[in-house]
Amino acid sequence: MWNVRFTNEHQDVNAIYNGYPTMFSLQIHHGGEFSKFPGRAKCDVLLNNMCESLNNQLVKGRDKPIITSLEFIREYLMKRIAIVQKDIQKCKGPLTPYGTRVMEDNKKEACKYIVAFNGGQKYQVTGYMREQFVVDMRERSCTCRKWELTGMPCKHAIATIWDMGKNNLGDGRPENYTDPVYWLDTWKQMYEFKIDPINGRSMWPKSQCPTFLIPPHHHKQIGRPKKKRKKGVNEGVIFMDGEDMVKFGKLSRQGKSVKCSKCNNNGHNSRTCKGQSAVGGSKKVNKTFTMKKCGGGKNAANVDKSGGGKKSTGA
C-alpha cells in the first residue's frame, strides 16, 4: 500500500518495498521524529482507537438480522448526536475542549523559549537546552513539524506569536492561528444535523417487489456464538526484547516456571501433581496431600506415628 522507508544506522532498505505502489515516502529516524509525515490529516493520532470505540458500541447489534442490526445502529447514532449536542452547548471559547487542553499545555512550555526575529517572516526560537527551531509565519510551519501535522501551533510557534504581539506585528493570540478543525464552530457544524425517528415495523409500507426473497440456508455452528471480533495475530501484542511480553492486556507467562503447591516441585501445578518427592530429598509435603494419601480422617488415626504401618488389632 504505502512505500515505507525505514532508516536505521544509515542503511536504506527501501528496495524491499519496491513491489508496492508508491503513495508517499515515509522516513523514520531515531527518536521517533515525524520529519517526513505529510501534514494533510491535521492529526497526530497513529492508532485506530476512534473506530474501535464505535465498534465496541455496536457489539450488541452485530449478531442480529440485517434490518434489526441497522435499526440498532440508527438508534445509537440518533442518541449519540443528541448527547454531543448537549456537550457542545456547555462549551465556551473559540476552541473545542480537546483543542483547549492541548493549547494550554503548549502555552506552559512556550514560556521557556527565547525568540529572535530576522526582519522578515521567519523567527529563530531557542530553548533552555540550546535547542533551536525555525518558525515561518508566512507558511505557518515549524521545523519540529508539529504545527503542520496537527494544525495546532506548537510551543515554538506560540512563543513566536507572543513575540509578534509584543512588537505590534500581530494580535498575539495563538487561537487565531489554529486550524479550523479545532474550532468550536466547526464542531457545531459537524453535529448540527439530526437523525429522525421512524415508526415501528408494523407501520412500514409493503414492498412492491414481485420476487419473494427467502433467507439463505443457515448452518448452526457448534458452541456459543462469539460476539467479539477476531483480532489479528499481532494486534494487542507488545514486543519486549524480541518476545511477546503483553498479549491483549495480559502479561505473558512465557519463560516462567510453574511451582506445585503440594510437593513444592517446579514444572507442574497441584492439579497435575502425582506425589513427586521434593528436589534434594526434602520430605516437606503439604498436609492436605498427606491426609488424602493416608485415606482421610478416620483412617489417618490408624496410622502409626512412627511410620511403621497400621496397629495390630488381633493375634
Image (cartoon, rainbow, N blue to C red):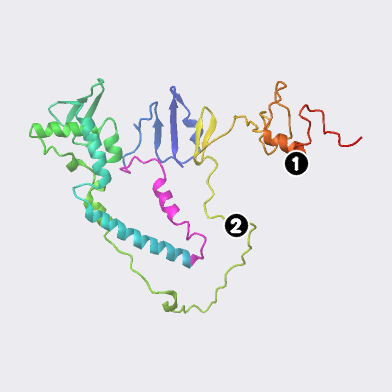
Query: Left or right: 257 with respect to 282?
Result: left
Disc 2 target residue: 224
Question: Where's residue 104, x and y in %?
Answer: 22, 38
Instruction: Give the residues in magenta.
Output: 40-66
Is residue 72 covered in magenta? Answer: no
Q: Nearer the viewer, residue 142 or 205?
A: 205
Pointer 2 with pointer 1, Cβ within 8 A: no
Q: Quadrant of residue 34?
A: top left
215 versus 186 height, above or below: below
Q: CA distance from mark 2 to mark 1?
A: 45 Å
**Residue farthest to the left, as pictured:** 168
Q: Is residue 124 visible?
A: yes
Which amino acid, mark 1?
Lys
Question: Where's residue 270, x and y in %?
Answer: 67, 36
Disc 1 target residue: 298
Question: Where's residue 233, x and y in %?
Answer: 55, 41
Dominant secondary-structure state across the stretch colored magenta? loop
Which amino acid, mark 2?
Arg
Q: Quadrant of residue 154?
A: top left
The numbered mark, 2 or 1, whose residue comes first in the sequence reads: 2
Q: Is residue 296 visible?
A: no
> What residue appears at the point 47 percent right and 67 percent down from the top-left corner?
67
Closest to the camera, between mark 2 and mark 1, is 1
Question: Where's residue 230, x and y in %?
Answer: 54, 49
Is residue 41 covered in magenta? Answer: yes
**Residue farthest to the right, as pictured:** 315
> What residue appears at the point 59 percent right and 30 percent down from the top-left corner?
256
Label 1 sits on a secondary structure element that is helix
Query: Left or right: 7 with respect to 127?
Result: right
| Residues packed near mark 2 inside 10 Å, few (<14), some (14 to 19) or many (20 plus) | few
